[in-house]
Image (cartoon, grey):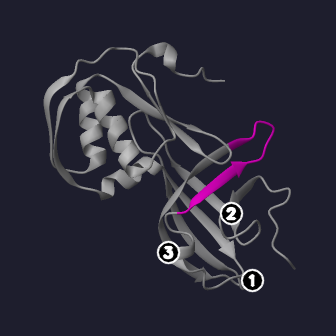
Amino acid sequence: MALTQDNRLLSISSPLGKDEMLLTSFEGTESLSGLFEFQIEVLSKNHSIAPQDIIARPVTVSINNRLQRSFNGYISEFAYGEVKADNLRCYHLTMVPWLWFLRKTSNHRIFQNKSSREIISQIFQERGFTDYDYRASGNAAKREYCVQYQESDFDFISRLLEEDGITYYFEQNNDTHKLHIVDAQNAYQLCE
């Protein structure tokens, strides 16, 4: 019998194809000014999915009820699990935002006469990240001299935002997630 995600409450879209994996568990955390992290468990008839085919690749998990919700991110961890009685292998995945990759870089550099916004935009541009919206309303002053010393790009950006009283959150969509950088209450979406 073929595996299918059709008519299931939970489904996963990945580079491996529509029905290569069957989602069995999804849990995680989201927070303001924090990286989301979701633990995913899937089953597959393929007992030897190659880690390079899924790690650092985008996936989307969908909850298909009356109010459909999607969670998008990149796989940061991949582990083989046991083979179940029905001959399906279990896999354990961790999904994180694109911003997580900036934790894997470290730099030593100086920025002169630039605002936090200009510095952050420069770092995102250097790394090829464009899926963000800088909506902080305050006019942060230019920093005469700003040093990144033995910090990951993520830690450096987080420090600048904290110093300026700015927070961020992620907006989840069907096939992407967007970083919103904000500093005003009216910048947040209302909860339903």
Q: Earlier in the sequence, mark 3 or mark 2?
A: 2
Q: Please report contact status of discs 1 and 2: CB closer than 8 Å, yes or no.
A: no
Numbered mark located on residue 86 in the image = 1
Indicate whether residue 144 is drawn in magenta: no
Residue at image point 31% right, 30% down: 118
Q: What stretch is highlighted in magenta?
A: 57-69
Secondary structure found at label 1: loop
Name the residue carrying label 3: 79
Relative image position of residue 175 (x, y in whole percent): 66, 48
In the image, residue 104 sits, relative to residue 141, either above or below, namely below
Pointer 2 local density, CA inside 10 Å: few below 14, some 14–19, many at least 20: many
Of the two numbered discs 1 and 2 in the rendering, the one whose residue sits closer to the viewer: 2
Q: Looking at the rendering, which quadrant does residue 58 occupy?
A: bottom right
In-image side of 154 versus 58 (left or right) = left
Name the residue carrying label 2: 23
In the image, residue 8 sits, relative to residue 81, either above or below, namely above
Residue at image point 45% right, 46% down: 129
> Which kind of residue does numbered mark 3 sit on?
Ala
Q: In which quarter of the image is the C terminus?
A: top right
Secondary structure found at label 3: strand
> Which kind of residue does numbered mark 1 sit on?
Asp
Relative image position of residue 99 (x, y in whole percent): 41, 47
